[in-house]
């Protein structure tokens, strides 16, 4: 064992009469441990939320949406589907979509909605609309069937706003509400539709605002034959940028990816995670100050020993390294213990929350609020690496001033009265 490491370890053990210094050392280790543990748990939960929300968004929105230049109506969407599927083997399903702004009314209740006209059979392969009508994945409100002619599927929050359920009739008013008939209807007259299903997408904006009809019903609501776009599902949603570029380079169409549609949301999540990391890192910073104070007290206590070591030939760099190693031992001990405990705590967070809930008298993770039936946790090695590296760096920085103070101890002054 190197001389500096051996002496640093001896100093950490201390003497029985110096229990106060030993207590401060234990508190410093505990402070680093708690800081690292808290960071790992919070970062794992935030990463888990990010991944779960991303999967929900990807499931409920097309991976890629293809338009004509300038947003012109598409009269032959089958041609576009043939072109893009022939060009891009990554495409596994495609379907047309019509977007309609409308008012829904039932009784005295009226609310705005964004209606999507889709091909139901194709839609079940492009998005999770069919799954959203079931009780799978922790859903509690999904029920019913995909829409047929003169039928509509409502997001469950939207259905609550108009007090509708499966089988009830609601009126839909659009800017161009025209039916193809011999007599026809005046513009703005309501079209009565039967609610065929209630959808729970586990995304508040979709559940609160979106409704779905088939293409024939969409034509009745808009009075036109064309569709607005073709949306696409890929083998891997993260290939969307590459497929988009291929379509725009080789075909006369425009495309938009799922990430572009939610870019502000994902950037907000990144910023929030960074801010939480910085805030919780202050716990480790406080522990680092404890290490600094501990080392300063040890330097004051060991002035005589430092003087003897210098007299025996120990160099300034050796004394410097000795106290840096002592501080790093404290920091590394807390970091390792905190990383192990934090990882174990994060991996078992749901059982721990279920155990504590009866004692606290509250549901620590209400699925009706957060849309998930459990706390989403993702322990990422990259996050643990950044946390442990930050803890070690802060610990190292906290040792510099006490170690430099030890180097500046004059052996003559330290041994003057010995």
Image (spheres, grey):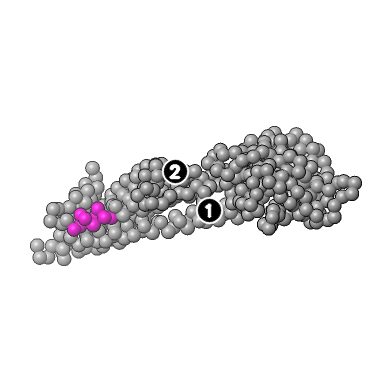
Which residue corresponds to the image point at 69% horizontal and 36% vertical from the top-left?
Answer: 93
- Work out whether 344 lies above or below 293: above
User: Along the line of sight, which residue is nearer the eye, 247 or 375?
Assistant: 375
Which residue is painted at 36% across and 57% down in the image? 283
> Where is residue 370 shown, x and y percent of the image?
51, 49
Q: Residue 402 carries which label?
A: none
Q: Assess disc 1: are there few (<14), some (14-19) or many (≥20) residues with their C-alpha within 10 Å of its C-alpha.
A: some
Q: What element carries label 2?
A: loop
Q: Where is residue 342 in the image (x, y as percent from the top left)?
A: 37, 46
On the picture, is 398 further left or further right than 62? left
* Residue 339 lies within the magenta run: no
For this orientation, the residue located farthest to the front is: 107
Q: In this figure, which residue is indicated by the disc labeled 1? A: 270
The residue at the far right in this view is 182
Q: Do the residues labelled 1 and 2 touch (CB within 8 Å)?
A: no
Q: Residue at x 74, y 46 (%)?
A: 193
Q: What stretch is highlighted in magenta?
A: 20-28
Please identify the quadrant where the C terminus is shown: bottom left
Residue nearest the viewer, comparing 171 with 326? 171
Image x and y of residue 79, in percent: 81, 38
User: Residue 79 or 312: which is nearer the viewer?
Assistant: 79
Q: In which quarter of the image is the N terminus?
A: top left
| Residue designated by label 2 | 379
Q: Is residue 23 magenta?
A: yes
- Crowd tier of the residue under label 2, counting other residues whose Cα lies within 10 Å: few below 14, some 14–19, many 20 or above: many
């Amino acid at each position: 064992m190197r001389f500096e490491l051996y002496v640093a370890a001896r100093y950490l053990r201390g003497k029985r009469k110096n229990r106060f210094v030993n207590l401060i050392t234990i508190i410093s280790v505990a402070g680093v441990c708690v800081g690292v543990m808290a960071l790992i748990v919070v970062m794992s939960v935030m990463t888990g939320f990010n991944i779960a929300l991303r999967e929900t968004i990807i499931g409920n929105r097309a991976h890629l949406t293809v338009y004509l230049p300038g947003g012109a109506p598409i009269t032959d969407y089958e041609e576009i589907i043939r072109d893009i599927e022939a060009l891009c083997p990554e495409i596994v399903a495609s379907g047309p979509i019509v977007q309609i702004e409308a008012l829904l009314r039932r009784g005295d209740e009226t609310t705005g909605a964004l209606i999507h006209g889709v091909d139901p059979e194709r839609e079940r392969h492009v998005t999770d609309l069919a799954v959203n009508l079931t009780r799978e994945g922790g859903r509690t409100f999904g029920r019913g069937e995909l829409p047929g002619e003169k039928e509509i599927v409502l997001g469950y929050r939207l259905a609550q706003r108009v007090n509708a359920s499966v089988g009830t009739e609601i009126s839909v008013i659009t800017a161009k509400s025209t039916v193809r008939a011999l007599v026809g209807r005046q513009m703005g007259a309501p079209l009565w539709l039967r609610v065929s299903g209630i959808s729970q997408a586990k995304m508040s904006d979709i559940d609160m605002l979106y409704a779905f009809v088939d293409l024939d019903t969409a034509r009745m609501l808009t009075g036109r034959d064309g569709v607005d776009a073709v949306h696409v599902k890929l083998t891997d949603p993260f290939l969307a940028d590459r497929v988009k570029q291929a379509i725009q380079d080789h075909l006369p169409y425009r495309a938009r990816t799922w990430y572009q549609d939610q870019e502000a949301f994902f950037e907000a999540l990144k910023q929030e995670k960074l801010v939480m990391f910085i805030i919780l890192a202050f716990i480790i910073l406080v522990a680092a100050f404890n290490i600094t104070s501990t080392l300063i007290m040890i330097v004051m206590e060991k002035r005589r020993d430092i003087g003897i070591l210098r007299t025996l030939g120990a160099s300034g760099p050796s004394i410097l390294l000795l106290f840096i190693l002592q501080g790093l031992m404290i920091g590394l001990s807390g970091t390792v213990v905190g990383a192990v405990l934090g990882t174990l705590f994060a991996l078992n967070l749901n059982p721990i929350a279920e155990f504590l809930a009866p004692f606290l008298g509250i549901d620590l993770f209400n699925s009706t609020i957060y849309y998930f039936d459990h706390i989403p946790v993702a322990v990422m090695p990259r996050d643990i690496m950044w946390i442990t590296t930050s803890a070690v760096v802060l610990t190292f920085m906290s040792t510099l001033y006490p170690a430099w103070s030890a180097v500046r101890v004059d052996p003559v002054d330290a041994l003057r009265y010995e």
